[in-house]
Amino acid sequence: MQSAFDRHRRRLQACFGAQGVGPDDQSRITLFIQSLKAINAGVLARLELQPMDWAPWKFLHTQYYRELEMSTLMGRATTWSTNPLVYVEAGNLNLGLWNRTRAWDYLQGPLAPDARFYRYLAMSHALLSVVRLIPVLPPSMPLDTPFLQALHDVEEENGRQIQLQIRLLKELDPGLERQEREALVEEEREQVEACYLELLESLCPDGSAG
Amino acid sequence: MPVFTFEGHELYYELHGRDGDPVLTIVNGLSMRTSHWGPYFQLLPEAGVRVLTYDMLGQGNSSKPVLGASFSDHAAGLHALHAHLGIQRPYVFGISFGGVVALRYAVNYPDALAGVIPVSTFSELDAQLRGHSTNLYLGLVRVGFGFYLDLLMPLNFSNAWIAEHQELIQLIRRVGVSTNELYGIQNLMESLADFRSMTPELPEITAPALILNGEFDYLTPRHLHDILRRGIRNSRLVLVPRVCHAFTLEIPRLTSRLIADFVHGVERGDWQGDQSVWVAAEDPAAEPLLQPCPGDHLRAIPLPASEQRQVARRQRSTPRRRRAPERARN
């Protein structure tokens, strides 16, 4: 992952540094982030219908609304593309994300602090931490447009929201040994990383900032 | 990219300098990475010291295990890296969090180092440092990585340096946010959650120890370095003028000279660890580079000359080796 990411970062920093982030790439990025948020919020929404009898419920509730807020913020701040192909590509990336993360697994039956929930935590930890776009912008590039400011705010908010996943991944006992838990977390991370690299690949096609 | 796999996790490292020269291993501070030591990759080899830098688990290009690593894992990983590279007796230099790792390494692996250089660091968390640590941690998790770096900037750098480098500081902040993973740094901080004072173990460190403390380091101030000096018999404390916690980034030439003089002194066999206190010159080319510290080195208030003479007389008349256990109890 690291070497592929470094390659894309160099390419994208050069491209965005020269031409800024245009409507095509803004749309690709926003649609991808909205897919992540839809997956996480979709799982969390189900907890809204369950009894509030578990200490972390309050934090899961907060995260649900924060995810909705960040998703709509990105939508409002984006200069949307008029190129229909951008939306076709985004649909494919979105489908790949659902397939790789098997997010539908968490949409059936009540959620309980068990191995399945632990896997959801690992997946959502990856959703909140792997996908970062500010690092592929040149460090000297001002974040002074509504889109870039919103992107920055979303990534900073992700850092606050992920505290829930960090605490539960470390402290929840899903009946697995530590090595099994580490392997599970790594598996989920690899799936999200693969989708993230596909997004990076799609940005600035042919060096155009779109 | 050179990596060493330790217990399933990758440690990224860089080795600079000539084969055969004594090796200095640099252990990063909390939110640092190998690239922060760029000037040292040239300065130290020029002074005849080979440099090994690496990113700890959670930092830079090394693995960032989501579930974290225990504090002892850091010293064990470093020991395994030395073995992997065939480095038998390195000088282990660590700053801040890395200084604690260096001290742990010196305690756990006394036969696997030639010297230790704890810098801007501590062996115990006193009330003020615990307060700073809590604030930094809460700033990191409740506000964000950028705010955590904002909290550190005025503690890390001197007024003069901050005034001269406003644009660079913004760049450092942005790069810091972009290149670090919040959860990786958070895991490093959390590995200190059950940290127990290492002060009782300091007498077990027998390797020569050069302790470096910036004059205006208000994050890990003088008395914490003095605990190290009193606890490590084979030590010297050097006060570095006009700089703060992260002075290694601010004055690489002076720091390199201090390191190289120590390493070569130990190699020649003429470096003496007598628990004495010294003040470094500001000019890295000064001869001599170090002067004995006059007066009470634990006071920030300049004493009148008459009182300084009294303190100096007291220090001369009381052998340090005999006085150390008594002071260590205070």
Image (cartoon, coloured by chain):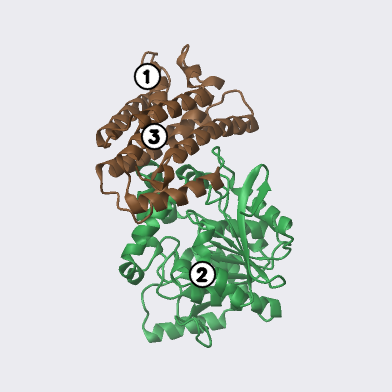
Task: Between residue B224 and residue B13, name the one nearer to us.
Answer: B13
For residue B307, side relative to residue A186 (left or right)? left
Mark 1 secondary-structure assignment:
helix
**Labelled disc at residue A45:** 1
Residue B275 seen from this side: no
Task: Between residue B212 and residue B175, name the one nearer to us.
Answer: B175
Query: Residue B176 in the image: x percent, y percent?
Result: 42, 53
User: Label 2 sits on what residue type?
Assistant: Pro
User: Label 1 sits on what residue type?
Assistant: Ala
Q: Quadrant of residue B211?
A: bottom right
Nearer-N-terminus badge (1/3): 1
User: Label 3 sits on what residue type?
Assistant: Gln
Q: Colour of chain B?
A: green
Mark 3 secondary-structure assignment:
helix
- Residues tagged by mark 1 and mark 2 found on one chain of the structure: no
Q: Colour of chain A?
A: brown
Q: Residue at x 55, y 50 (%)?
A: B61
Marks 1 and 2 sit apart, C-alpha to C-alpha, by 52 Å
**Which residue is the extreme one toward the top?**
A109
Q: Quadrant of residue A116?
A: top right
In the depicted structure, whether residue A156 falls above or below residue A65: below
Q: Chain of mark 2?
A: B
Marks 1 and 3 sit apart, C-alpha to C-alpha, by 16 Å
- Residues tagged by mark 1 and mark 3 found on one chain of the structure: yes
**Labelled disc at residue A161:** 3
Front disc: 2 or 3: 2
In the depicted structure, whether residue B279 falls above or below residue B287: above
Query: Residue A158 in the image: x percent, y percent?
Result: 39, 37
